[in-house]
Amino acid sequence: MVPLSWYMVLSMVVFAIGVFGFLSRKNVIIMFISIELMLNAVNINLISLSHYLQDMRGQILAFFVIAVAAAEAVIGLAIIIALFRNKATVHVDEVKEMQG
């Protein structure tokens, strides 16, 4: 059986990769993928703790996080498509008109 600490380390590494990808890239699509990585790291953490504690609440919460991530992906991709149609770019630095 795999110890709980390995799942925590895996979750921490995946979350760190997501934070690094979000902060270092300027492409909006890569930023959304990084957010999805961070949400999946939280799901790994919730499910592993749920299994360790023999409680279903963590798995149920992970299911709701997956549902929110799906809704976020749909809305985010719709915003990216609208941005690309108006500006013909998906880079954050090149979009200045959305500020205040």
Image (spheres, rainbow, N blue to C red):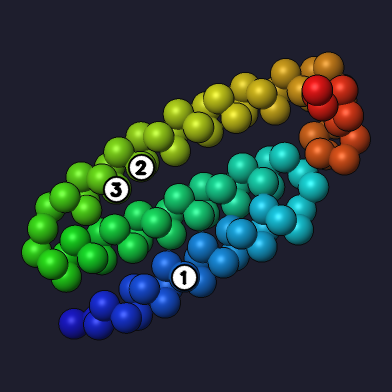
Quadrant (top left, top right, bottom left, bottom right) of the N terminus: bottom left
- Label 3 and label 1: CA atoms lie apart by 16 Å
Secondary element type, mark 2: helix
Q: Position of residue 7 (x, y in %)?
A: 34, 73
Residue that mark 2 sits on: 65
Query: Residue at point 70% right, 28% down?
Result: 80
Precedes in sequence: disc 3 or disc 1: 1
Q: Is residue 3 above or below residue 33?
A: below
Residue that mark 3 sits on: 62
- Label 1 and label 2: CA atoms lie apart by 17 Å
- Packing grade of label 3 (10 A; few <14, some 14-19, many >=20) is many
Query: Residue at point 35% right, 55% down?
Result: 43
Q: Position of residue 24 (x, y in %)?
A: 76, 58
Precedes in sequence: disc 1 or disc 2: 1
Query: Residue at point 72% right, 18% down?
Result: 82
Looking at the image, do the residues carrying marks 3 and 1 touch, with CB atoms under 8 Å apart?
no
